[in-house]
Image (cartoon, helix red, strand yellow):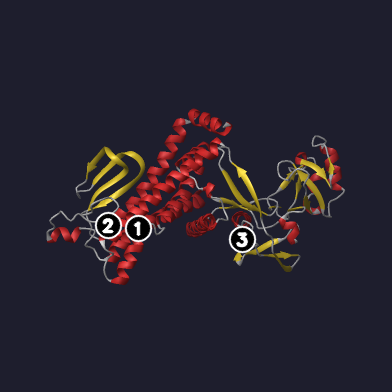
Amino acid sequence: MDSFIDLFQMVLENIWLYGASFLLVLTILVFVHEWGHFIVARMCGVRVEVFSIGFGKELWGFTAKTGTRWKFSLIPLGGYVKMFGDSDPASAGHDKDMSYTEEDRKVAFFTQPVWKRALIVFAGPAINFLFAIFILSMLFGVKGKYEIPPVITAVEIGGPADQAGFKPHDLVLEINGRTASRFEDIRRSVALSLDTEMTFVVERKGEIVELTPVPERVSFEDKFGFKQEIGRIGILGASSGVALNGITAIDGVSVDSNDIEKIRSKILSRLGNPFEISLRGITKEGGSMLVDPLLEKNKGLTDANSKFYDVIVLAEEYKQIFVKFTPPAALLEATRATWNITVDSLGAMGQIVSGKRSPKELGGIIRIGAIAGDMAQRGWLALITFAALLSINLGLINLFPIPLLDGGHLAMYAIEAVKGKPLSEKTQEYAFRVGLTFLVFLMVFANLNDIAQILL
């Protein structure tokens, strides 16, 4: 209940920020998605009657010279493009009561060959992916990004990584057969591997070693009360320098974090050999990490003028690497990021279906709105990045072969292409009813799930 009260107060205090950021992101992504359908329909010679942001009663709109009615509607949770001749916005069927002239048939959606209809439908999800790639490539090219080398600098004693044989300074080369080029690759792969053995290939002092950790499940709760489970093996990355006042124990003996000079003395006496430290906010209560700081990288501990005077440098390369991409490199990196997000999202959804991950992690409008508001508080860059992530997931979900979604239409067009004729209208009608029921159930479940997690 406290979580609900805190969230309610937070939303009240920032009502315009949360509401405006959510509607802004949703409106842009819906517009992009529907514009994909619209522009390809126009390219294929199909007349578009309505382009609506939202559902229900029209609030404001205008009719273009092409005859398309552009409008904003009362319920701003989605949108649609209605093709000429369709009996409903979902293109589930055509209006049999209309009398079509030869000219009408040329511009009606349902009279187009199956490949054109499939292309028009596919354009919506496709442009969501392209839009995400565009956003990310602009961020990488203009702003750049920090990257952390895939080097392990600390290993939790008794944790999955320690049990598998990881050591400080291991350079990760591959994870489950895929190249690891940055520490984020390690974090992302481990987070999605719940109770599943992984295969790491690392380089250690010039030798190639294969290790097989099994990540442990850990559950965390964000500030809104939403819970999520991730995999964890207990390691720190190459950017991890440790402030002396963050150390709570050395080799199992507690230390006073306010007595910096005593901590410095103990650390200096151990440099050049592996030893254990416990860190505030990182290690478990009573737990410790195995570290092996290099002597030549920690000369700053004896130089009062050094910026590393009160910091242990754990890795050979302490600093994160800042990369500012050229336009082609930014596009390639954005495509790579979009692909990884898509694969990870599919993996997480597969875990929910298989029962490996709890369906309680499914979020609805409440969770999306809360995250959008949180991102807006962090700044425009965070909100834009969130919009890219949401665009990818919108495109992906719409490709699922569920009737009423774009993927359901594509599945029916595939059957039509194989059979040489469309499914019967009765079959399509039943399919769309089942799809509608499933989607309504899923939406209600996701939002009730959000409410339950906040309240409990």
Residue 243 in the image: x percent, y percent? Answer: 74, 42
Residue at the spot 51% in from the left edge and 52% down from the top edge = 140
What label sits on residue 55 in the rendered view?
none
Q: Determine if residue 155 is in view.
A: yes
Where disc 3 sits, the SS reads: loop
Q: Which mark is residue 123?
A: 1
The x, y position of residue 68, in whole percent, is: 22, 48
Q: Are the residues at dot 3 and dot 1 in contact (C-beta closer than 8 Å)?
A: no
Secondary structure of the residue carrying numbered label 2: helix
- The amino acid beneath tag 3 is Ser
The x, y position of residue 14, in whole percent, is 49, 30
Is disc 3 surrounded by few (<14), some (14 to 19) or many (20+) residues within 10 Å? some
Badge 1 element: helix
* Left or right of 406 on screen, residue 362: right
Mark 1 and mark 2 in contact (Cβ < 8 Å)?
A: yes
Say whether residue 166 is visible. no
At x 45%, y 50%, the residue is: 135
In the depicted view, which residue is nearer to us: 401 or 82? 401
Callout 2 amino acid = Ala
Question: Gap in Å between the C-alphas at discs 3 and 2?
Answer: 41 Å
The residue beneath circle 2 is 41
Identify whether 135 is placed above or below 201: above
Where does label 3 land, which residue? Answer: 181
Quadrant in which the C terminus is drawn: top right
Picture quadrant where residue 178 is located: bottom right
